[in-house]
């Protein structure tokens, strides 16, 4: 059975890459064929494997955040933040990183930030003579780090996947915070080293054109985003600080980011902060189908005992000290061709609890290794992030040269930096 499940995952990825059809559709079909005709399950049992909680959370959160996208609030905020950095040209890569992190952390998510910041960043390279490799690393790092924030798209997905792996919500919040911290600090070190080396050259020049201020609707959208983030973050943090307080414990058990996001989306509709049809259309349906389709196939693998077999093999055949590095390498290789959110995390997160018990390693270390590994190579032109950057390059830029820069420079830099960070994090744990 292990062979069938693993083969189905690989074939789904290959077919999705070759045909440009959503991997989730292939995963759903394989779930049906293997579940009903190999494992003998009823169709209703296979349908129940659809990760409804993850689907609801992603849908509701992105629905709310889409108001700030639809009315242009996040784009204007991005331009305002970049303008503030005009007096520090040598720090432009770090500025791009922080801007992308903030916008992504406010709910825009990885793909959305790349969609409207990658073209801007590549144009900046032409105007300012900034190194293209460092520039694309900066915007990619920022989009990833911000999305990994506990209340943003990827952070919410990570917590949802941990929930399906039977990890308590408080613990999942702590683990997702650790993932965010790691993916936020690693880029600062990499880009900081480059900025220090490049400071003496002083080749980068930023245009001093004051962008338009936010209008009334856009300001309200930003205020609502910060309000929701405060509500969702403050209760779990207070519960960690005061675990014996019954009132906080009561609230923490009932604070759900999905329902709160729907509540704030309704407020946004009442305030007419965006067109309802446009906001619904902006929901990342392709990402939802991919994550839930692959999640369905992974759940089938859990039901068939594949996860236990894989965990047992790793814990008995690989030395404990080598496990985090191996997990990092596997994730990095997978992410060269596949999505972190749609494939890597759903495939590897379920093995973490059992592997941690068998090896004695901290589950947080393994979760961090998976995401740091996956995101170290996510800029590959064969993966979703790198292909989006490649597709957004201006007509005047040589696409073949950019592809080579992504594959042979940006990816190696990301993997080496991630591997060094993994070894250091392993020493800490």
Image: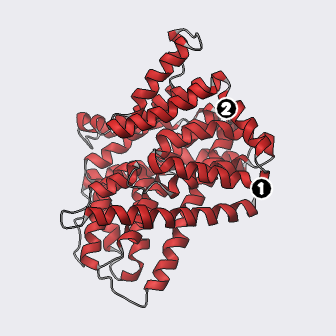
In the rendered image, the residue lying farthest to the left is 395
Local secondary structure at mark 2:
helix
Instruction: Look at the image and tell me whether residue 377 can be seen.
Output: yes
Instruction: Look at the image and tell me whether residue 63 can be seen.
Output: no
Left/right placement of residue 254 relative to residue 26 reads right
Query: Of the numbered discs in the image, which one, if any, rests on residue 307?
Result: 2
Which residue corresponds to mark 1?
A: 321
Question: Residue 167 placed where, x, y %?
Answer: 68, 36
State which quadrant residue 102 falls in: bottom left
Q: Is residue 380 above or below residue 251?
A: below
* Quadrant location, the C terminus: bottom right
**What residue do we see at 47% from left, 39% from top?**
342
Q: Earlier in the sequence, mark 2 or mark 1?
A: 2
74 or 324: nearer the eye? Answer: 324
State which quadrant residue 380 falls in: bottom left
Whole-angstrom CA distance, mark 2 to mark 1, is 21 Å
């Amino acid at each position: 059975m292990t062979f069938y499940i693993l083969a189905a995952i690989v074939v789904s990825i290959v077919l999705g890459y070759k045909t440009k059809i959503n991997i989730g559709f292939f995963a759903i079909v394989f779930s049906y064929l293997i579940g009903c005709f190999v494992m003998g399950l009823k169709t209703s049992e296979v349908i129940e494997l659809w990760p409804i909680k993850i689907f609801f959370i992603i849908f509701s959160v992105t629905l709310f955040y889409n108001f700030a996208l639809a009315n242009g609030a996040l784009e204007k905020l991005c331009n305002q933040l970049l303008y503030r950095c005009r007096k520090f040209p040598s720090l432009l890569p770090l500025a791009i990183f922080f801007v992308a992190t903030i916008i992504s952390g406010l709910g825009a998510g990885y793909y959305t930030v790349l969609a409207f910041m990658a073209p801007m960043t590549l144009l900046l390279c032409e105007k300012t003579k900034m190194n293209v490799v460092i520039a694309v690393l900066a915007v990619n790092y920022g989009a990833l780090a911000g999305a990994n924030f506990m209340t943003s798209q990827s952070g919410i997905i990570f917590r949802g996947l941990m929930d399906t792996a039977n990890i308590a919500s408080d613990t999942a919040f702590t683990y997702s915070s650790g993932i965010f911290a790691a993916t936020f600090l690693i880029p600062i070190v990499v880009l900081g080293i480059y900025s220090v080396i490049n400071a003496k050259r002083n080749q980068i020049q930023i245009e001093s054109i004051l962008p338009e201020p936010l209008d009334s609707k856009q300001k309200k959208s930003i205020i609502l985003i910060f309000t929701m983030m405060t509500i969702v973050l403050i209760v779990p943090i207070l519960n960690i600080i005061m675990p014996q307080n019954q009132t906080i414990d009561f609230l923490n058990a009932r604070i759900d980011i999905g329902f709160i996001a729907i509540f704030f989306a309704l407020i946004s509709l009442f305030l007419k902060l965006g067109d309802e049809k446009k906001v619904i259309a902006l929901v990342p349906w392709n990402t939802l189908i991919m994550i839930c389709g692959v999640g369905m196939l992974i759940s089938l693998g859990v039901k068939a005992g594949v996860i236990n077999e894989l965990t047992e093999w790793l814990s008995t055949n690989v030395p404990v000290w080598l496990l985090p590095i191996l997990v990092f390498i596997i994730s990095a290789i997978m992410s060269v061709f596949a999505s972190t959110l749609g494939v890597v995390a759903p495939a590897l997160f379920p093995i973490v609890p059992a592997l941690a018990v068998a090896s004695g390693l901290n589950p947080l270390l393994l979760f961090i290794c998976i995401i740091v590994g996956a995101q170290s190579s996510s800029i590959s032109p064969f993966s979703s992030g790198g292909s989006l950057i490649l597709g957004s390059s201006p007509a005047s830029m040589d696409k073949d040269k950019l592809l080579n820069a992504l594959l042979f420079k940006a990816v190696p830099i990301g993997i080496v930096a991630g591997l060094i960070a993994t070894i250091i994090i392993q020493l800490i744990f």
